Amino acid sequence: MNTQCKPSKLLLLLLLALALLPAAIPHAWAEGSFQAVVSVDSMKVYAKEAPHGYLGALPRGTEVTVQATAGNAALISYAGRTGIAQTSDLSRVEAAAEATLERAMTATRETRIYKKPSTSASYASVAAGTNVTLLALNGNCAKVRYGGKVGYMPYNHLGEPGSATVETPAAVDTTPVQTGNAPVAVSRASRVYADAALSGESISVSKGTKLTLLAIRGDCAMVEKGGAIGYMALGDLEKSTASSSTPAKSSNPFASGSNEAVIYAFLTGEMGYNRAAAMGVVANMKYESGYRPVCDGDRGTSYGICQWHAGRKDNLINYCMENGLDVDTLEGQLQFFRYEITTRYSSVHAYLKGVENTAEGAYDAGYYFCFNYEAPAARTSQSTKRGTYARDTLFVM
């Protein structure tokens, strides 16, 4: 969202509610840690420190640790983050009725089994498709037997044996990305792939072929030649003292290690966008946040590199919490970006994948992404401005 938006009536009401929140919280917290589960469909969570800004919402059945209470306010922790919620939205784990049962279940996704009924307890990883025995159920906390031991795991990660196809989310690759521009040469006959997994569609390259190295992740190298970007094994490359066949500035226009360099590498690598599509997205992120992941807008209702607003900000926070990512980091926000654009904005993703790798393609990508994904105020003029910046500044650098 554009950070210049005027606050709506709904936003003013939200601000008024937040202004009244501190008055309802006594100065003294009553200590006493205990486990609790969310007993309403959606529990709002606010920041501990004044002015107690809205952090997001947790769904029914989510287990949290209540660290202290003050009147109807509860100081809670969940997935390493701390906030304030209403005690009336919570039920103590030990006070909740526990349904006792014993039946076979299957993990429907990669998940964790905890030693105690708390996400802060020690845990072991459980692969999708693993069979366990459900012993008891308390909200969304399932007591299970697995491998001869008893532990706890989220009930919504379980399904009936042989039911729907097991869905395993793509693992988040946390290997650091090194970016920059360096002339390299192919050290032996090899192949360049369209996919960073180094599989599928590919072309052969002969020994001695000059390329520009754009980024490295593990053993995978992202390379460029003549405006075309591909991936190959890092071990098949060697330093080249000769000038690259493509000027460095036309390959990756960003300084090595900068946020924009990491974003560009992610868009062309992980997302598979061509240069024009990537520049269209990058242009929008520049106008939205200046590439800064810790960036508040719209009086605190928007956040991040894309200035996700209101409910989309909640989705960002919840996605990162559920997937063990830090919402304040570029990595966490890029992973959410991939999730959101390939699911809720799949038409935008499809459009970017089909954009021509030309200057006009960069304009089209910048305009379309702004109009349909960011949707700021003054949508048409902003879309034109960002498309022009992608075409006339970024793509030709």
Image (cartoon, rainbow, N blue to C red):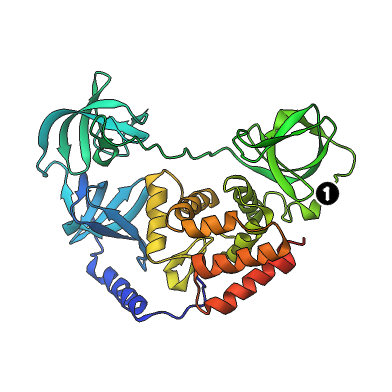
- Horizontal and vertical percent for residue 207? 83, 29
Q: Nearer the viewer, residue 83 or 182?
A: 182
Q: Quadrant of residue 118?
A: top left
Q: What residue is shown at x 73% (from left), y 52% (from top)?
A: 252
Residue neighbourhood size for the residue with mark 1, other residues' Cα within 10 Å, grouped as few (<14), some (14–19), many (≥20): some
**Observer able to see residue 293:** no
Q: Looking at this view, name the residue that lies furthest to the top.
A: 148
Q: Nearer the viewer, residue 116 or 49?
A: 116
Q: Is residue 148 above or below residue 344?
A: above
Q: In screen coordinates, is 75 left or right of 374?
A: left
- Horizontal and vertical percent for residue 289? 56, 65
Three-letter amino acid code at the position of disc 1: Thr
Q: In screen coordinates, is 54 left or right of 37?
A: right
Q: Quadrant of residue 218?
A: top right
Q: Which residue is mark 1?
A: 246
Q: What residue is shown at x 37% (from left), y 62% (from top)?
A: 49
Q: Looking at this view, name the residue that lies furthest to the right.
A: 242
Q: Is residue 203 above or below residue 252?
A: above
Q: In screen coordinates, is 372 left or right of 67?
A: right
- Horizontal and vertical percent for residue 319? 40, 50
Q: Is residue 202 above or below residue 248?
A: above
Q: In screen coordinates, is 101 left or right of 175?
A: left
- Horizontal and vertical percent for residue 213? 75, 42
